[in-house]
Amino acid sequence: MPYSERVVKFLNNFGISDFDEVEVTLNDGSILRGIILPRPEVGDVDVIIIKLPNGYNVGIHVDNVKEVKLLRKGEIPSFSVPIGETVREEVVKNLPKVRLLATGGTIMSKVDYKTGAVYPSFSLEELHMLYPEVESIAILELHNLMAVFSEDFNPQIWSKIAEAVYKAFLEGVSGVVILHGTDTMHYTAAAMAFAIKNKPGPIVLVGSQRSSDRPSSDAFENLLAATLVAARASFAESVIAMHYTTNDGLIAIHRGTRVRKMHTSRRDAFISINAQPIAFIDIKKLEIKMNTSHYFTRSKIEDIEFHGKFDDKVALIKFYPGMNPEIIDFLVDKNYHGIVIEGTGFGHIGKQLLNSIKRAIEHEIPIVITSQTLFGRVNLNVYRRGVEMLKIGVIPAEDMLPEVAYVKLCWVLSKTRNMEEIKKLMLTPIAYELNPRTESQNYLMPLEIDKLMKSM
């Protein structure tokens, strides 16, 4: 639905239309500068949406506006097209093609101010219209794949997303951006890392901690950075693009098998574990600053391989003091195919679980051991309990994150049920999910922002 008739008439009096750069004088004398955006599908039809120079969008009721001055006529964006439609040759010239796959999440949501809750309500087309700056980076193909909160994801959904990504690459895109809820985004990022081998471009998962219609939203800069990476990055990996600090201006590109959400609400909630981000994006300069020399480069499209199946009979459980072994027995009796356990410290568990774990392995159910500490690595050769676990036949996951070990075991079990093959694949580095050694500088020591920004 467009703006109300009174808003259209009011703007026309000043010669203003969508995407014009304007100076708005309010009734209280304050002045705002920005770009008039088309009205979203929901909300008050009498509220004018303006994109400010800092990237935030604000809504101003027409009754509060005294005058609007035209600074520069804008152009209606024309680089964004639905899949299957053709684009004029002069539009696509010199710009890479990026496909945006919407799956849901806060980045695609708005606040229902009656209840205070956040609901999926943005269409991908509307989100793009609110952020026209991406037009200078790439031709965007828009595909609404699903609208699902990330806590409702499962291995079958990973497979569906992987198939959509694979199809996008076969159809010639430079990279793929997946708009995703943040709560389980690191699971999906790991899944994409394993699902597609020899990637011809980056797979960039992006979300926001605050909905796109809020002035403090991190959605815009995250999406801009994700699009830039998908279009221009030299590396071809599954990554997550999110704020590096609570402030705007710097976006971290985390490797999909090395990242975890570490805070419920902060804009810099995502942190690389036992690693540093693979790159950073300076939003003002729109530059990619590589932070490592070790990465997978873009492969030829004919070399791409799809391995997008995942076994959904895998459990991820956390050991705790007094844990009842019946939990392990239950999973065995329910014919689960694999179990990942978050042990303490080096990967230890209570002695009461040993017999149940031995039973699981005798039933050819692999037991993978990770650590609750996240940082550091599993080492079952230091203490007696660890040695006992190794004798039973558990698989120590080295420095793999618990969530990544879970996703990888789902992936491995879709390929083989042979215990020796499972162990071999779990301990073989495939997508930088395993480091040969753990570097001390990667322990809760973020890079100094000032030095980083000066180097870009």
Image (cartoon, rainbow, N blue to C red):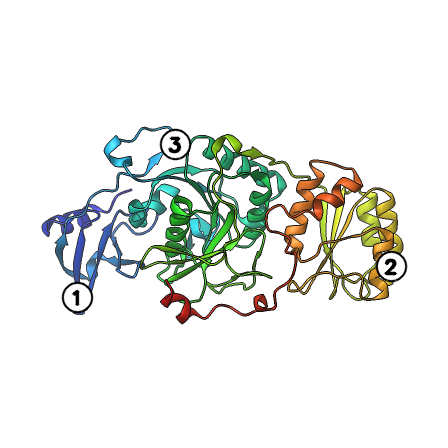
Q: Residues within 10 Å of mark 2 (few under 14, many from 20)?
A: some
Q: Residue tagged by mark 1? A: 27
Q: 31 above or below 302?
A: below
Residue mark closest to the camera, 2 vs 1: 2
In-front residue for pair 274/403: 274
Q: Residues within 10 Å of mark 1 (few under 14, many from 20)?
A: few
Q: Earlier in the sequence, mark 1 or mark 3?
A: 1
* Label 2: which secondary element: helix
Q: Residue tagged by mark 3? A: 83
* Label 3: which secondary element: loop
* Label 1: which secondary element: loop
Residue lying at 37% horizontally and 56% vertically, measured from the top left: 221
Residue lying at 56% horizontally and 33% vertically, measured from the top left: 305
x and y percentages locating residue 128 in the rendered image: 34, 45
Q: Residues within 10 Å of mark 3 (few under 14, many from 20)?
A: few
Residue lying at 40% horizontally and 51% vertically, measured from the top left: 223
Q: What is the distance, in whole Å, between disc 2 and disc 1 at their CAs?
A: 76 Å
**Of the numbered discs in the image, which one, if any, rests on residue 388?**
2
Residue mark closest to the camera, 1 vs 3: 3
